[in-house]
Image (cartoon, rainbow, N blue to C red):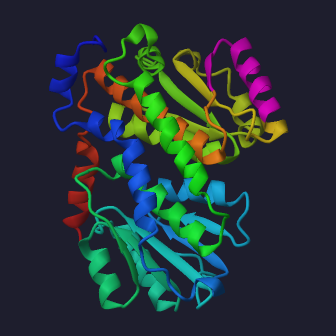
């Protein structure tokens, strides 16, 4: 499909996923500001470990927070996707943050109940649903927000922005307000470069999407960009209905780099993207990016590199998130797919509901 045909794009994107992607700068800024107004629990100075429970689009904000907060945080922040929690998640020095956009994610609700039974403190991030009701009933801390967005993955600005606000106010990381402000300004600048009105000839996101048709994207990131690679993979899955993979450096240098021989009919369809930052990658990881890229290229695998813009970790992470979102949208359009529809997920949820 012609990625410059605005009428056809509008017909495919009937529920305006593009509008949510375009709105990321304002969404992220609003979430950060909203976090400054929310109740801060008095027990936070005594917390020694933080667990963020979530799934899919509601978990990725936690991944981003854990990555960037890990640069300075005196306490561990861990993301758990699933129904249960490790045995060590217990007691008054533990905070479990339950993140569920809808408030009805069954895995997160189950993890909430486990945390409650073990005497951990709880804080919920949600728009409502059963999670909000549970939190109110249990007199735990509720950070609720309202939005016209109807897809968790489109609310990445909310999930990351709220968590950043909490972490900054709790003292788990220094005040990142200036980084957030830079990120917002950066997002607004690059929106003008990736937007739908920018023709494919000069639009990097459209050009990259064109290269993914008939190929399997593989996204590689290190350090704070590992969760960004995971986000890109998820966005290609959900928005583009496309199979995609993510792998971290340096771990992939201990296994995946050997798997470049078979099956050739699959390897010839791979397109590997390295998300690499000279400023914020570990120097050895940055070298690994270069060496791995060349190794794959020598084995006939298509490769590319994305270098995030910005003068701070959060600005670069958010710029990369933004590019990946536009990339997934244009890949969906190129395939003739509605970027909003996630029929298999809805069918699976219904099947699970039928087996209560």
Number of numbered tags placed on the structure image: 0
| Residue 198 drawn above or below residue 244 | above
Furthest residue toward top: 201
Is residue 32 in sight in this rendering?
yes
Is 15 or 212 nearer to us in this picture? Answer: 15
Q: Which residues are magenta?
A: 286-306
Q: On the picture, is 51 further left or further right than 206?
A: right
The quarter of the image holding the N terminus is: top left
Inspect the magenta stretch and tell me whether residue 112 lies in it: no
Is residue 241 in sight in this rendering?
no
Identify the residue at horizontal 57%, vertical 57% (top origin). Answer: 177
Residue 15, image x and y in percent? 18, 38
Residue 292, image x and y in percent? 75, 26
Identify the residue at horizontal 57%, vertical 33% (top origin). Answer: 219
Q: Main secondary structure of the magenta part?
A: helix
Is 333 or 160 nearer to us in this picture? Answer: 160
Residue 316 image-quadrant placement: top right
Q: On the picture, is 313 further left or further right than 325?
A: right
The quarter of the image holding the C terminus is: bottom left
């Amino acid at each position: 499909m012609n990625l410059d045909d605005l009428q056809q794009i509008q017909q495919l994107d009937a529920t305006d996923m593009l509008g949510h992607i375009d709105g990321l700068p304002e969404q992220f800024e609003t979430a950060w500001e909203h976090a400054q107004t929310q109740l801060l629990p008095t027990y936070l100075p005594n917390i020694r470990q933080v667990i963020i429970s979530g799934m899919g689009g509601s978990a990725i904000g936690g991944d981003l927070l854990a990555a960037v907060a890990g640069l300075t945080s005196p306490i561990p922040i861990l993301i758990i996707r699933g129904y249960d929690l490790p045995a060590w998640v217990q007691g008054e020095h533990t905070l479990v943050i339950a993140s569920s956009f809808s408030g009805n994610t069954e895995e997160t609700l189950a993890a909430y109940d486990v945390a409650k039974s073990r005497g951990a403190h709880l804080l919920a991030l949600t728009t409502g649903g059963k999670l909000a009701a549970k939190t109110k009933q249990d007199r735990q801390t509720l950070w609720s927000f309202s939005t016209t967005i109807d897809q968790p993955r489109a609310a990445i600005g909310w999930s990351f922005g709220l968590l950043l606000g909490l972490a900054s106010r709790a003292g788990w990381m220094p005040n990142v307000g200036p980084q957030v402000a830079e990120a917002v300004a950066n997002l607004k600048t690059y929106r003008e470069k990736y937007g739908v009105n920018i023709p494919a000839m000069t639009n990097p996101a459209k050009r990259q999407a064109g290269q993914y048709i008939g190929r399997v994207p593989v996204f590689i990131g290190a350090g704070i960009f590992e969760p960004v690679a995971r986000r890109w993979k998820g966005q290609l899955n959900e928005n583009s209905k496309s199979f995609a993979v993510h792998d971290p450096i340096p771990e992939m240098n201990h296994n995946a780099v050997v798997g470049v021989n078979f099956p050739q009919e699959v390897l010839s369809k791979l397109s590997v993207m390295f998300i690499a930052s000279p400023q914020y990658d570990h120097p050895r990881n940055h070298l690994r990016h270069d060496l791995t890229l060349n190794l794959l290229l020598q084995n006939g695998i298509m490769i590319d590199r994305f270098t995030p813009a910005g003068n701070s970790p959060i600005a670069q992470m958010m710029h990369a998130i933004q590019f990946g979102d536009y990339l997934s949208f244009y890949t969906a359009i190129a395939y003739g797919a509605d970027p909003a529809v996630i029929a298999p997920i809805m069918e699976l949820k219904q099947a699970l509901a039928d087996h209560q």
